[in-house]
Structure formats: C-alpha cells, structure tokens
Amino acid sequence: MRFETGQHMKLSQQMKLAPRMIQSMEILQLPMLALQERIEQELEANIALEQVEPTPSSDEDAIPTEDSSSSESSVEQREMVVGDGSADGQDDWERLSTFESDYREVFDNEYSPGHSAKRSAAGERDGKMDALASVPSRSASLTEQLQEQWKFAEVTSEIQAVGECIISYIDDDGFLSTDLETIHQQNSNRPDLNISLELLEESLHQIFHWIDPPGIGARDHRESFLLQIDRFEETGSDEIEWDVLRSLINDHYDDLLENRLPKITQKSDLTLEQIHQAMELIRKLKLNPGRELISEDVPPIIPDVIVEYDEQSDAYVATLSDGFLPILQITPHYEKMARDRSVDKETRDFVSTNVRNATWLIESINQRKNTLLRVVNVVLARQREFFDHGPQHLKPLPMLEVAEQLGIHVGTVSRAVAGKWVQMPKGMMLLRKFFSGGTETEKGQVLSWEAVKAKLQEIIDEEDKSHPLSDEALAGELKKRGIDIARRTVVKYRQQLDIPPARRRKTF
C-alpha cells in the first residue's frame, strides 16, 4: 500500500446561510409574545440597543429632565453595566466608580437607596416594595395541597406515613395511576417506612375519607365517580336517584359510555326515564377531581394582525398590532464610539459588534412586519367571502401560490404565518387556518377543507338526534350539497371536530 501527500485545487458551489439571514428567519416566525420576550433579552444583552421612550404630546405636559450631557452620561452608565461582556471588566468598573463620583447629584434622587431608607424611616410607603409585595406567589402543587390536608387526618402514625407515600404517586388529574403492588415493591426497602399491601389498602381508604375534593386517589374514572356519589349521598336528599346512578356505574358502565340505554333497560328493572334522571346527576360529578385544586396558567392570546371592515371603501383593512412592541433604536453614544478611531481597537470592535447586531435586529423586526402584512393582504383579497359570510365559504389557498404572488420563498410564507393570530370582527383565528387545500363542488365552487368541516358540523347540528346520521349518511348529505368525499374522510373530519359517532349522539 502506498501513501502520498499532495495539494489539489477544487472548484465547488456551496449555499450557506449568513447569521443575518438566520436571525431574520427566527424573528419572522416568532408570535407576538415570543417576540416581546426576545426583544427584552436583546435589550438586556446588547449595550448598543435601547428603547425609545414615548415623548409627551405637548410642552405643557412635558416632564423636566437633566441636561443633555448628564442624560447621555446616564445612558452610558446604564448600558455599560447591562452590557459588560468585555474581557477587561476591571477597567469598566473603575470607569463606573469615577462616573458615580463625578455625577453623584444625578443619582441622588427620590429613587436612590438613600432616599428609600429616608422614606421608610419617615413612615412613607415605598412604591417599588409595594409592587413586589403584590406579585402573586407560586401556587402550591396538587401533591403539596394533599399532603397539607393529610396532616390533619385522624389516623395512626403508620397510616400517616404510608398515606404520604401514596399521595406522592397521585397525578395532577387526581388519580392513582400506579397500582399498589408497584408502590409496595418500590418502597419495601425503605427503613423509615413499615409498608405492606394491607396497610396500603387501609391508607388508601383513609385518603378517600379525609381528602377533598371527593374522588382524589381513585384508580380510574369509575372508582372516582363512585367515591363522589358516596360523598353526595352523605349530604344530598335525592337518595333514590343516587342509587340508580350507582347501579348504572357499578353494573352497566360500558353500556352507559356507549349510550346503549335500551340494552340497560333489558338487563335491569330501570326505565328510560329513571336512567335519564340519574344521568342528569352525572353533571355534578368531576371527571378529573384533581384539577379542582390546581389552576393551569393559560397564556393570553395577543393577535399579530387586526382586521377591520372599512365602510367607506367597502373593504377589509389589516393593521399590525405592534403597539405592544417597544420602539428600538441604536444608542447614539455607542454608534459614535464605533466610528471613533481614538477609541482602542478592542473596545471599538466590541461596540461595533453590538451596533451591528442591534441594526440586524431592528431590520429583522421591520422585515417581519412588512412580510406579515403583505401575506395578510393576499389573504384578505382571496378570502373576502369568508369574512362576509363565515367559515363555510373559506377557499383553498396554498402557500406556494402566495409565495409566487409575492415573489418570496414558500418557507418564508410558512414562517410568517406560524403561530400568528388574526383578530377579526367575528372573532380570533389562527392565520395558518387560511392556508389549506380543498375540493371543487359539482357546481364549480371551490371550497377549502376547513369549509367542508364547517358544512359537516352544520349537518350534524341539524340532524334528528333520535335518529342520528351514520358516517355513510353524512357522506350522502355532503354529496347532495355538491361535496363528494369518501366515508373514511367523513370519519377523519368528524374526529377532528371531536364529534362522537352516531350511536353516542343518539337520544332516547
């Protein structure tokens, strides 16, 4: 075998994304809340980026400020502290100490620590401390709340310890999803816990008795319903109806879930009227009792685009809801420093990098606004019937068609509509919902798949619930309206709309 070394020239073409392009694509696909968070992070990390404060509308309402030199120095001090990322950090701190000693009077104001101490000594309230005190604390988890309740249970010390172990296995829905045998195996070697299957069973029954809301600790929905019925029977007056519901859940649970009420009447002595009366009590039962003690933080939806109807032009007009975003600009001091040759090269390179990153960010945000607005205007022009008459008139609109019309890449359109919400006169809607394929009716009308789903929902809402339509019959009804789709497609759309099959929709 022979080894050789040598130099060779090779000509090739490669496509690489520049950092500026990557940042632009990232900013484009961010929804409003995520963009706000990203801007806040950049304001903290980039010394050359600052937020433009709103100016007063008139000179009479204007608030007096310091002179320009003090203001510029104040900005310099603030930005230097926030953006201290240079290798020579000791020099920055020395410059900061010198600056504080020279401009002590600027910082000696009502918000300085010394004045805060004086206000506290004088008995005055501190607004910042009041604001911090008003911030809600972290809510206790379900396990923490159950453990707190269990401390007051009048049980023996052995059951108390085993009960704490069982509570640690209860999920957020309030169910004990781990069987007792597994709990016994996983904790049998604990020296601080004398555990057995009998003690586990007894502790679980005590949890049923002492823990609220009822149904906590059940191993499935059926047991949870029975535990809740037990608690209602202790305080309720409809003893006969509760007994009927208990019998239904105990002996006919599967038939009850599948809405096979006539079959239940054949197997029992109950009438349909008794079954209906008992089923009304199910509304008082909780499907997931653990959710009664914990609250999920649902983030608010902030629309990226607001669509309004203009009566004068008889057209729908789109505006960007960018009022939530701060106005950004390059800090003039650092922009000047980046061009100042008298500044040492290391500092100038550091400042120049931050100025360049800040410029890219501002340009990326402006490009995001422009691209999003252009895409929405195409939607408004194409989907006029939807805005006038509702979702049944939504037309198919492929992203490729929009990209070709605007002269941009289809991936840009996809990023522009990702996670964005549109506020319309008739409600809120995801922007991506406007982009889908569709079908053509027998009359030549083009409908998107979302419009087909809306028509399917309309047919099911208008059906006779005593004789609900099967999936085959639903396909036939759609065909009468000019929409020819297969039965399996009807099943898929029905499941996407969270509509049960015909046997479960039937009323007796």
Image: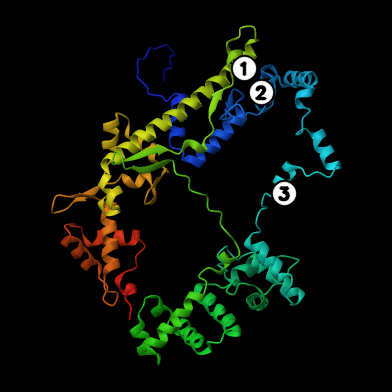
Locate the N terminus by quadrant. top left
Q: Secondary structure at mark 1?
A: helix
- Judged from this view, the residue extending furthest toward the front is 60
Which residue is under mark 3? 133
- Judged from this view, the residue extending furthest toward the right is 121
Is 296 situated above or below 235? Answer: above
Q: CA distance from mark 3 to mark 2?
A: 29 Å
Which residue is under mark 1? 333
Which residue is under mark 2? 75
Estimate the x, y position of residue 433 in percent, counting from the top left.
Answer: 34, 47
Which of the two residues, 116 or 198, is positioned nearer the viewer here? 116
Q: Secondary structure at mark 3?
A: helix
N-term mark: 1 or 2: 2
Res 416 quadrant in image:
top left
Locate the C terminus by quadrant. bottom left
Q: Which mark is residue 112?
A: none
Residue 187 seen in render? no
Estimate the x, y position of residue 111 in percent, counting from the top left.
Answer: 75, 34
